[in-house]
Amino acid sequence: MKPAPAAQPYLDALIAHDPFAEMAAADVGALLSHATVTYHAVGETLIDAQADVDQCWIVLQGRVRGERPTDVTVGALELTAGEMFPIGALLTARKVVSRFFCETEVFALRIPSADFLRVAKQSAVFSDFCNRKLTFLLERSRRALQASYAAEGGREQQLPRTLQSLIRREAVSTLGNVKIRDALSLMQKNAIGSLVIVNAGNEPIGIITERDIVPRVVLADRSPDDAVETIATTPVATLPAHASSVEAALLMAERGFRHVVVVDERGALAGIVSERDLFALQRHTLTGVSGAINRANSVTQLAICASDARQLARNLIAQGVESLTMTRFVSRLNDQLVRRVIELIAPTHYVNAGELCWIALGSEGRHEQTISTDQDNALILSPGLSQLRALDFAKDVNAALDQCGFPLCKGNIMASNPALALTVDDWIARFAEWTERGDPESLLQANIFFDLRPLWGDAALANRLQAQVLETASANQRFLKQLSDNAQSVEPPLNWLGNLSATAEVNARQVIDLKRFGVRPFVDAARVLALAHQVPATNTVERLQAVAALHKLQPAELSEWTDAFSFLQSLRLRAQERSEFPDYPNAVAIDALSPMDARILKECFRQARKLQQRVAADYP
């Protein structure tokens, strides 16, 4: 190691990188106040594994590698200019887990731990980065995408607005013990259609609207002297002020609400956003497509609606709408369209909703559909329904969905397949066969059907099947071990240096299949965890959240894995929106990634490997 000149002249080089570019100049200066710059030769060890640490390192030039003794391949870190280490050990005052050494000649800044911790305490930006690095970078990437979109001048749409920007007036609220007559007088006095009920801390606990007065007061023969909380809708659905208008529109559509209560960072009432506020902003978007689907009277009309829905999705993706919101949005519109197709076709086959249940599988079952998606569906039949009649009905529905832009499944995972139109008892027997055999084909089939979700018809049939399947699978440790091994079969594409590794070559360009090598490891691992703990959720993030709620995952792990999954879905959606490789909709070219996105993608693949290792530890 050779000392170099004082650190302050390196300020300009530092602020070219996150989080320093976002920090106040005074905070960056404080970080560098006692820093030294050192030179290190190739192969030199900077920090040994299990060593105590008393300083933060920032790479100025060169490449540093961090390796855990137990994992020297996919789990390795590659650190380049602007990156810090070992952040976790400094924040938690623990020993270093990895060994850090120089892969090339390196110039590095060395910052005393006291200065690092002081700036982490006084700078919200620095603290946020150190504690939630991936979240911080994701937000920067999203803002960069939105800025790029804005520079293009937009695509038929305005940028998504925050709910804070849509609040037109101060929210009117009252305590729950106020009399109904006084609450209604307050609504009349302020000429408002809704009134939020709050507790002593101004936190929303309920809401009443004009539509509630007749059924809950007049027809229910309530005394006007009763407490208003007795007629309020509780608990009240809320969204944070920084949430987007798209999130609010989805919540309203999914729950049938006309108002969304907005809260600040403390959970206190910030305002109300109404359906009218949102539709004034999105008159030709969500509400237009959704309404057109409901009004459609032919498959031809629905095909136009499906095309409009995909275009709307492309517009929102280009605007940087958060990916988990985006996939739920796509899935919701697709659900609505599938139901409308079924409603049009069922009468022609004399099929009614009480005779069967149409179930969604795969990404549709998980609420994770993207723009490019084929059909994955099946039928659960009531014992008295003729399978032949059900199959004729399903064949026409599958054909109509194909006409609407949902291609027929190449693997024939469709309701028109006789093997996939069964009674509950037959389905239970089929699952028992898959779990007992445990061969690759059985595991593939089981994984698809573990994500089932009722879409139309008698949901009780699907609920009964799912409950039985969860109970059977969770009790079969051998089968869970086989599923766990299967979840390890796809390795995240990082080479031994920790760099991105192509999974295919398309049009002479090195690409990565984001669906197979990025999204799938998270989906498979979350499914294993959910089955092991009898979690009925099918959505990947909801599965992880539910397992964490059972204290089986650490909060930090949950945050890292959901953030990584969200980014992979976002990058995948953007690839589909750009349609650079039409025959490979989930492929992204490595040379097309911005430096920031490449950096985040590497971290996402590392998180995928960590999740795989977490599942493998349960089933060694």
Image (spheres, helix red, strand yellow):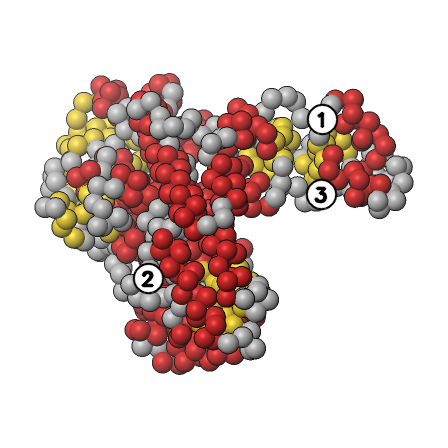
Amino acid type shown at disc 1: Ile
Q: Nearer the viewer, mark 1 or mark 2?
A: 2
Q: Residue at x 83, y 35 (%)?
A: 180
**What is the distance, in whole Å, between disc 1 and disc 2 at their CAs?**
51 Å
What whole-number distance in Å separates the C-alpha atoms at marks 2 and 3? 43 Å
Instruction: Name the one closer to the observer, 335 or 236.
Output: 335
Q: Quadrant of the N terminus?
A: top left
Q: Quadrant of residue 92?
A: top left
Tell me the residue that label 2 is attached to: 409
Residue named by callout 3: 233
Circle 2: is it few (<14), some (14-19), or many (20+) Cα within 10 Å?
A: some
Residue carrying label 1: 192
Q: How far is mark 3 from mark 1, CA to CA?
A: 17 Å
Residue drawn at x 32%, y 49% as measured from the top left = 372
> 346 and 68: which one is in front?
346
Quadrant location of the C terminus?
Answer: bottom left
Which amino acid, by three-letter code, is at mark 3?
Thr
